[in-house]
Image (tube, rainbow, N blue to C red):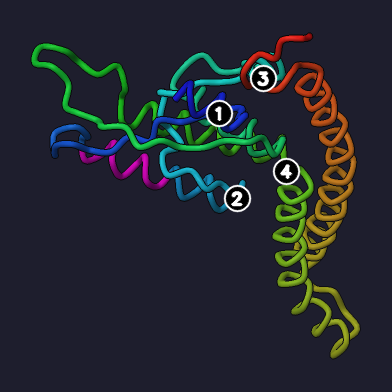
Amino acid sequence: MVTRLLEGRLDMVVGSRVESEQAAYRAGHRIGNRFLSIFVALVFDSTLDDVLSGYRVFSRRFVKSFPVLSGGFEIETELTIHALQLGLAIDEIPTPYCARPKGSVSKLHTWRDGFRILRTIFNLYRAERPLAFYTGVGAAAAVSSIAFAIPIVVTYLETGLVPRLPTAVLATGLMLSALLCMAVGLVLDTVTRGRREMKLLAYLSHRAPGPERRQT
């Protein structure tokens, strides 16, 4: 993996786990890993087959530009999304994955850590793609507002009355919330772009990986 990193002048190489026996994965771990890998691929345009693999090597400039925020099994997701967001050069190498030796116990809890990883992906999506996130929330609020408002408008046009005032207030509040969400998304998108540029500058301040060149 180190050789592949240096020869390809890459920033991260992931050891994609390939089961060498059925007992290597528990059923819950297999399903959860596959689900989360597909989710990251759809949201962040990932091409990695094993997002949660902890077997990785990094370039110096990757490490220097990566802000560590997690302390558990969510760290693999953070590493992957950091690389995808900055458009770094990454690759995968298939590695055999065997069952644990007898007497050893996995530290991974299927449901607890699965939810923590999913929560990390959600938070990173909100932080790294705020425009898409808040526009989606705003669009949902706007659609709900219109759905509540249509019967009220129809009744008003027919009778000149607004008999369901609380519903009218709710529809107005939802539409104002939709506009506010979209405005927040625009502001946070600008902030996110600035933060991403700072990380990219930290990344570019270090030499790319590769064989040392001697000066003559």
Q: Earlier in the sequence, mark 4 or mark 1?
A: 1
Q: Secondary structure at mark 2?
A: loop
Q: Amino acid at mark 2?
A: Asp
In terms of secondary structure, what is the magenta stretch mainly? helix
In-front residue for pair 145/83: 83
Calculate the distance from the C-alpha at mark 2 to the C-alpha at mark 3.
19 Å
Identified by mark 4, the residue type is Arg
160 is within the stretch colored magenta: no
SS at mark 3 in the image: loop
User: Which residue corresponds to the image point at 71% horizontal and 10% vertical from the top-left?
Assistant: 214
Answer with mark 2 or mark 4, whichever residue precedes in sequence.
Answer: 2
> Which residue is at the front of the view, 202 or 125?
202
The residue at which mark 3 appears reads as 66
25, above or below 175, in the image: above
Q: Amino acid at mark 1?
A: Glu
Say whether disc 3 or disc 4 marks the residue closer to the N-terminus: 3
Q: Which residues are magenta?
A: 27-35
| Figure quadrant of residue 83 | top right
Q: Residue under circle 1?
A: 7
Residue type at mark 3: give it.
Phe
* Residue with the mark numbered 2: 45
> With respect to residue 171, does 99 lie above or below?
above
- Mark-to-mark CA distance, 2 and 1: 25 Å
Judge by depth and name the residue closer to the eye, 100 or 139. Answer: 100
Q: Is residue 179 left or right of residue 20?
A: right
Cα distance between the residues tagged 4 and 1: 33 Å
Write down the residue under mark 4. Answer: 129
| Quadrant of image for the N terminus | top left
Query: Are the residues tagged 3 and 4 within 8 Å (C-beta)?
Result: no
